[in-house]
Image (cartoon, rainbow, N blue to C red):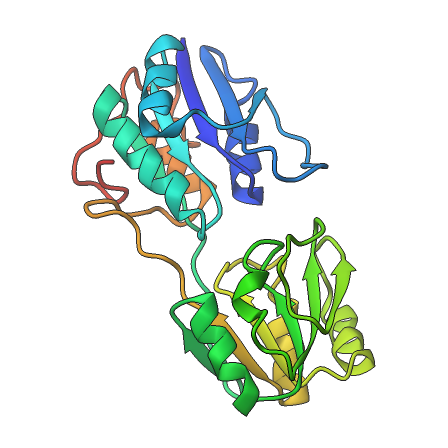
Amino acid sequence: MFHVLVLGGTAEARRVAGGLAGRGGVRVTTSLAGRVSRPGAVAGEVRIGGFGGAEGLAEWLREHDVTALVDATHPFAAAITRNAARAAALSGVPAVVLRRPGWQAAPGDRWHWADSLEEAAALLPALGRRVLLTTGRLGLAAFAGQTALEFVARSVEPPEPPMPPHTEVLLARGPFTEADERQLLRERRIDVVVTKDSGGDSTSAKLTAARELGLPVVIVRRPPLPDGVAAVPDPEAVLDRLGLGHTATEPTRRPTAGSGPAGPC
């Protein structure tokens, strides 16, 4: 049995699981951290919760006869990616990292890049007074010191304190349309948007809306991948690395972990 463990929580992870489930001789298990109360449907088996660090994950890989590990977590899940790389090295299980490409600026964009949430917060006073925060429910503490600004914090789940004193919490789940985002920016009288470089189409409409309205956008750069680890850009490339792409007739018994496009973990 060819057993693939997918570290999930993203749309791309669900696509990988969907591409693996139902294949003869293939078992797929998707691991979710359990931070979202209503995750989307996932094909195959699902487990919820952490592993107890890199050593715990390596033990799980060995105990469950995992053939390959796919890290398809969020681009900002740096700790999980480090643990996955370490676990792959400890267990000898080949790993593939999937990261959707980051966003690219278009003509008319007013983007300001930051290396951290704290750096993003420091840029805001010079850019506007009313801020749309779309950085997720964690990390609002980085903006708590900006007491002269007003924030609209949008996230899927209620954000965790501390947060800025003048904050409106807006619970919403994407994808969002450009019309929706234009309406939000206008109704809330937003001066500046703050986001992370998550990439993908499901949350990019706010960038287009900000460009059309001439608003500045502060974008937090992604954390770097661990040394020696590269990434493939889409689920199709993951399946090809596993020997399970559309040109494959049967699973590869052991995917290679050499210096190919995904690199060893």
Name the residue: 70% across, 62% down: 154
Q: Quadrant of the N terminus?
A: top left
Q: Quadrant of residue 48?
A: top right
Horizontal placement of 13 versus 61: left or right? Answer: right
Measured as percent of width and height from the top left, residue 225 is found at 30, 50
Tally of numbered tags: 0
**Residue at the image point whose x is 42% and y is 76% from the top:** 113
Query: Does 185 appear above or below 260?
Result: below
Against 14, is 25 above or below? Answer: above
Q: Residue 54 location in percent, x, y?
A: 33, 29
Res. 199 in view? yes
The quadrant in which the C terminus is found is top left
Q: Where residue 107 sits: x, y (%)?
A: 50, 86
Task: Say above or below: 9 vs 254.
Answer: below
In-image side of 58 versus 177 (left or right):
left
Q: Does residue 206 appear to the left or right of 103 in the view shown?
A: right
Asked if 148 appears above or below 55 in the picture, the reply is: below
Q: Nearer the viewer, residue 58 or 214?
A: 58
